[in-house]
């Protein structure tokens, strides 16, 4: 048991003044948590008058401190800045688009204060705005660093909720209380992530560093899901998901295990990129195998002369060798029709594909920094992945285009490391679909 002296509630707000009106009112109505506490709000480069409104409406509130940034620092760097400014020996991260229940802070404080010293963080429960469906209770991580909120949007009556004190791999970054010293010793949120999966990464680092995370069901907040993240745009978030998932896997798998799981991670990343690429105009050209027919003259005995295309035999050979798509493309080009980009040159116009290639480019450009980050994570390791993954097996969930066929293939299964604890599940088994 480690007593808490003071707790700092950290809230980021980016163009979310209307959310803060509800969130701060709910914080003002909190029951006494039994310790001194403060509220820190970072106006993260907002253009909606958040800072001026806070000074006017909350300027006399002794418990609240406003910190301003002229630009959007992102979720990770913004929260790190709040932790640096915090007076508390524990920090409660709270999304601005939430409404915490009256016992929220007290429940977090009670569990962390009474927990063994190796408990670094406590995760609260997140429900929808009406309090009928689950948003976050327990998170699960996939083999390649992605993650899911287990039973997301399921009715609370049927959702699988952890019990008080149950261990979690990670706490949700929108409702958690973490010891400030543990957060800083682990390196805080990785600022290269900007947003998304930073809490998964932090959780893995806390566990590998010898600490634990537990669940506090009484620390409940109501959440307007994606209210802030929607401002980023769906496909811009896709860039963050793919990049951050790879970084999470690369940095945190321990030496020996990373080298064995990496081929499966790379195969999944390549397969998804290929599947997305094939949704773009002209992508049929990528499917042509130049050594599978007439293009490289592998379809006939090399000593034989191929008849002219004007003959039936020449037409038949070329049709079979090129395939209908490539045959027609070449015919149109000869007629002067196939010179436009739409009929000849592949074009990447799908925003999901663009996000995927942006993620790949970022990873290549920052490989040295990622390697340094990995070295720092492994240097402070005190607990093996064997022990961590025995508690929290990785999931294999077909999610992206092409995943279903790839994950079911014997070739992919052979690339998964022997002995890696894996839970195979369908997407509808992990979360509520269509809600």
Image (cartoon, helix red, strand yellow):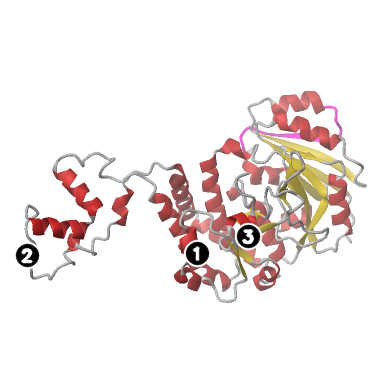
Can you identify the residue that label 3 sits on? 141
Which labelled disc corresponds to residue 407? Answer: 1
Q: Residues within 10 Å of mark 2 (few under 14, many from 20)?
A: few
| C-alpha distance separating marks 1 and 2 | 44 Å
Q: Is residue 69 on the magenta stretch? A: yes
Q: Is residue 89 left or right of residue 390?
A: right
Q: Nearer the viewer, residue 177 or 332?
A: 332
Instruction: Indicate which disc, 3 or 2, sits on the residue closer to the N terminus.
Output: 3
Image position, residue 223 (x, y; %):
72, 41
Q: Residue at x 9, y 54 (%)?
A: 309
Q: Secondary structure at mark 1?
A: helix
Residue 159: quadrant of the picture:
bottom right
| C-alpha distance separating marks 3 and 1 | 16 Å
65 versus 161 height, above or below:
above
Screen quadrant of the N terminus: bottom right
Which labelled disc corresponds to residue 305? Answer: 2
Image position, residue 390 (x, y; %):
68, 71
Q: Residue at x 64, y 53 (%)?
A: 431
Q: Secondary structure at mark 3?
A: strand
Image position, residue 432 (x, y; %):
64, 50
The stretch of residues the image draws in magenta is 59-72
Q: Residues within 10 Å of mark 3 (few under 14, many from 20)?
A: many
Which labelled disc corresponds to residue 31? Answer: none
């Amino acid at each position: 048991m480690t007593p808490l002296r003071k707790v700092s509630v950290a809230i980021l707000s980016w163009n979310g003044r209307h959310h803060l009106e509800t969130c701060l009112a709910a914080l003002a109505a909190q029951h006494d948590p039994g310790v001194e506490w403060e509220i820190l709000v970072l106006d993260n480069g907002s253009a909606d008058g958040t800072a001026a409104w806070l000074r006017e409406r909350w300027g006399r509130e002794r418990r609240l401190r406003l910190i301003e940034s002229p630009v959007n620092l992102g979720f990770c760097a913004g929260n790190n800045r709040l932790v640096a400014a915090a007076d508390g020996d524990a920090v409660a991260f709270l999304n601005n688009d939430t409404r915490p229940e009256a016992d929220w802070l007290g429940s977090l404080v009670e569990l962390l204060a009474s927990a063994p010293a190796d408990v670094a963080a406590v995760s609260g429960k997140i429900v929808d705005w009406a309090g009928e469906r689950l948003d976050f209770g327990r998170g699960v991580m996939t083999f390649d660093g992605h993650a899911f909120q287990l039973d997301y949007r399921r009715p609370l009556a049927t959702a699988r909720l952890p019990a008080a004190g149950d261990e979690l791999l990670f706490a949700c970054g929108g409702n958690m209380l973490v010891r400030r010293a543990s957060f800083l010793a682990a390196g805080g949120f990785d600022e290269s992530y900007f947003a998304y999966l930073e809490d998964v990464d932090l959780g893995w680092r806390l566990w590998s560093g010898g600490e634990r995370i537990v669940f506090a069901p009484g620390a409940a907040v109501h959440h307007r899901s994606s209210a802030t993240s929607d401002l980023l745009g769906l496909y811009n978030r896709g860039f963050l998901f793919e990049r951050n998932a790879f970084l999470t896997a690369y940095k945190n798998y321990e030496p020996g295990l990373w080298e064995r799981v990496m081929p499966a991670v790379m195969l999944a990343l390549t397969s998804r990129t290929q599947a997305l690429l094939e949704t773009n105009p002209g992508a049929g050209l990528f499917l042509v195998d130049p050594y599978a027919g007439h293009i490289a003259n592998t379809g006939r005995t090399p000593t034989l002369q191929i008849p002219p295309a004007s003959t039936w035999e020449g037409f038949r050979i070329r049709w079979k060798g090129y395939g209908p798509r490539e045959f027609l493309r070449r015919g149109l080009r000869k007629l002067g029709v196939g010179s436009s980009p739409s009929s000849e040159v592949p074009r990447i116009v799908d925003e999901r594909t663009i996000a995927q290639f942006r993620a790949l480019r970022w990873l290549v450009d920052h490989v040295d920094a990622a390697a340094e980050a990995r070295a720092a994570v492994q240097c402070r390791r005190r607990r093996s992945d064997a022990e961590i993954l025995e508690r929290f097996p990785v999931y294999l969930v077909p999610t992206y285009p092409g995943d279903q066929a790839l994950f079911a293939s014997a070739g992919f299964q052979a690339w998964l490391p022997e002995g890696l604890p894996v839970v195979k599940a369908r997407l509808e088994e992990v979360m509520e679909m269509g809600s």
